[in-house]
């Protein structure tokens, strides 16, 4: 039993011990929350992109844009031949400056092949192997590749890596592209798409959009999506680099409805992209945010999902002039030009800086970011006997390599045919500089869609919470 003297000496010792425990506890809690804070901050960082000629409003900083979102359909636990399955675009090949986008079975030749869309450093002189997973067994085969000619002299270009399927691996399900001679263990496989040859398709028309970057024009996005729907599209594939929060809300709406597929386009994490096609005016390593590899991937991705694909941008609409929908237009074109060819449509620009018309102005849309396309009915005339840009609608099973304007290669050697502009043409709405003495042409054909477009757009804006019901 302690004496009073020794008891009085023990009390401060216990207090000191308790205080020390509390101090350690608070230290541990502080360290935990500090690490958690750093983790959260890092998870929202965006890759660096040069911002010259940015179309963003001054008040919108780069970090207002939504981060890349992993929309992989493969669960994180999915494995193939003991390795992780990575169902996302833009995966770097180890030891090489090559980035794999998507891998697809090629059914259109006597020998079955795997075609992989990739981005390659052109001067690297790389050699590749296909490492395939077949019934949980690994098979290695040599691969060949071709760099597409439309690289515009940038360091990187779109490429197709081809591996012929033969031997003991006739039904591969996953593939990894490696440098030749690499024997180290495969860390991840990509799933191979288009495994089954299809003759019927869930979609009649799919629109391929490449690429969405720094996008803020909510009204134009909704108008574009609803115009595509009115024209007959059942699917819109958007390769997205980044956008603002309100745009993301619209994308989420259409993705939830099943009308849009949003493919995370993370090429800017690895390669310095340009903002144009002319390397002298738009420096970088890869042309215009990598739109060409994205377009090629979209064609292969929807080769056996869609009867036709339309390759154009969110500010462009291929409008028939004698009928209202693509479903009515395409049989007419195939009768006139043939069914074994792609169709190109003449570009016609409707400048936002021209005089506006308020016939279909909507007060309820006035606070929504973007310009109402219905206010602009004056187009810049195309000069006769000069080249005019175009975009295409094509049966994807005819395509081997595509580019921004037309095809580079097709299965039958045919390219595209220019559709008479009295049958259909592109209505292209954007800011555009033209000579002051230009006599603009009044063309209000898109007003034929106004009575359907206005309530459809309003409904979406209400559903997203941008305007009241």
Image (cartoon, rainbow, N blue to C red):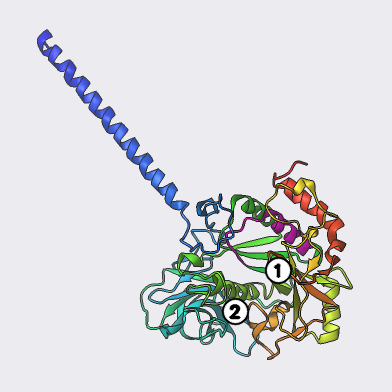
- Magenta residue check for 237: no
- Circle nearer the N terminus (1, 2): 2
Write down the residue under mark 2.
105
- Above or below — where is 345 with respect to 324? below
Q: Position of residue 332 (x, y in %)?
A: 86, 79
Pointer 1 residue: 207
Q: Position of residue 222 (x, y in %)?
A: 72, 56
Looking at the picture, how far across and down is residue 307, in whole percent?
Answer: 75, 74
Residue 140, quarter of picture: bottom left
Question: Where are the magenta residues, as a range?
Answer: 211-229
| Residue farthest along the top direction in this orientation | 4
Q: Residues within 10 Å of mark 2 (few under 14, many from 20)?
A: many
Say left or right for 105 vs 12. Answer: right
Q: Is residue 260 above or below residue 337?
A: above
Q: 153 or 98: nearer the eye?
A: 153
Q: CA distance from mark 1 to mark 2?
A: 22 Å
Q: Secondary structure at mark 2?
A: strand
Query: Which quadrant: the N terminus?
Result: top left
**In which quarter of the view is residue 293 placed?**
bottom right
Location of the C terminus by quadrant is: top right
């Amino acid at each position: 039993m302690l004496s009073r003297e020794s008891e009085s000496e023990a009390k401060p010792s216990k207090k000191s011990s308790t205080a020390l425990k509390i101090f350690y506890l608070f230290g541990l809690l502080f360290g935990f929350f500090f690490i958690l804070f750093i983790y959260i901050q890092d998870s929202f960082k965006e890759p660096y992109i040069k911002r010259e000629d940015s179309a963003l409003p001054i008040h919108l900083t780069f970090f207002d844009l939504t981060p890349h979102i992993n929309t992989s359909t493969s669960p994180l636990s999915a494995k193939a031949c003991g390795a992780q399955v990575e169902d996302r675009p833009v995966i770097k090949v180890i030891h090489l400056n090559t980035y794999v986008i998507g891998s697809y079975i090629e059914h259109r030749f006597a020998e079955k092949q795997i075609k992989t869309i990739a981005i390659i450093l052109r001067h690297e002189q790389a050699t590749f192997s296909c490492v395939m997973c077949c019934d949980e067994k690994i098979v290695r085969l040599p691969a060949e590749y071709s760099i597409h000619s439309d690289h515009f002299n940038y360091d990187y270009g779109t490429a197709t890596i081809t591996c012929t399927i033969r031997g003991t691996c006739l039904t591969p399900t996953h593939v990894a592209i490696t440098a030749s001679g690499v024997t180290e263990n495969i860390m991840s496989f990509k799933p191979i798409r288009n495994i089954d040859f299809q003759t019927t398709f869930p979609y009649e028309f799919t629109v391929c959009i490449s690429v969405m970057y720094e996008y803020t024009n909510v009204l134009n996005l909704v108008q574009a999506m609803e115009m595509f729907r009115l024209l007959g599209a059942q699917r819109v594939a958007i390769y997205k680099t980044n956008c603002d929060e309100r745009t993301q809300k619209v994308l989420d709406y259409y993705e939830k409805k099943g009308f849009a597929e949003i493919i995370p386009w993370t090429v800017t994490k690895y390669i310095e992209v340009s903002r144009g096609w002319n390397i002298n005016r738009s420096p970088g390593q890869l042309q215009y945010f990598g739109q060409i590899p994205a377009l090629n991937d979209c064609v292969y991705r929807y080769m056996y999902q869609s009867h036709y694909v339309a390759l154009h941008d969110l500010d462009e609409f291929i409008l028939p002039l004698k009928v209202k929908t693509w479903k009515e237009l395409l049989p007419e074109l195939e009768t006139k030009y043939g069914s074994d060819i792609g169709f190109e449509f003449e570009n016609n620009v409707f400048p936002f800086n021209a005089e506006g018309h308020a016939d279909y102005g909507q007060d309820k849309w006035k606070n929504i970011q973007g310009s109402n396309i219905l206010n602009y009915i004056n187009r810049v005339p195309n000069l006769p006997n000069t080249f005019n840009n175009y975009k295409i609608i094509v049966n994807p099973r005819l395509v081997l390599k595509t580019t921004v304007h037309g095809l580079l290669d097709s299965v039958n050697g045919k390219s595209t045919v220019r559709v008479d502009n009295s049958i259909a043409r592109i209505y292209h709405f954007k800011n555009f500089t033209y000579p002051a003495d230009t006599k603009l042409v009044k063309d209000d054909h898109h007003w034929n869609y106004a009575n359907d477009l206005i309530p459809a757009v309003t409904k979406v804006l209400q559903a997203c919470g941008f305007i009241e019901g």
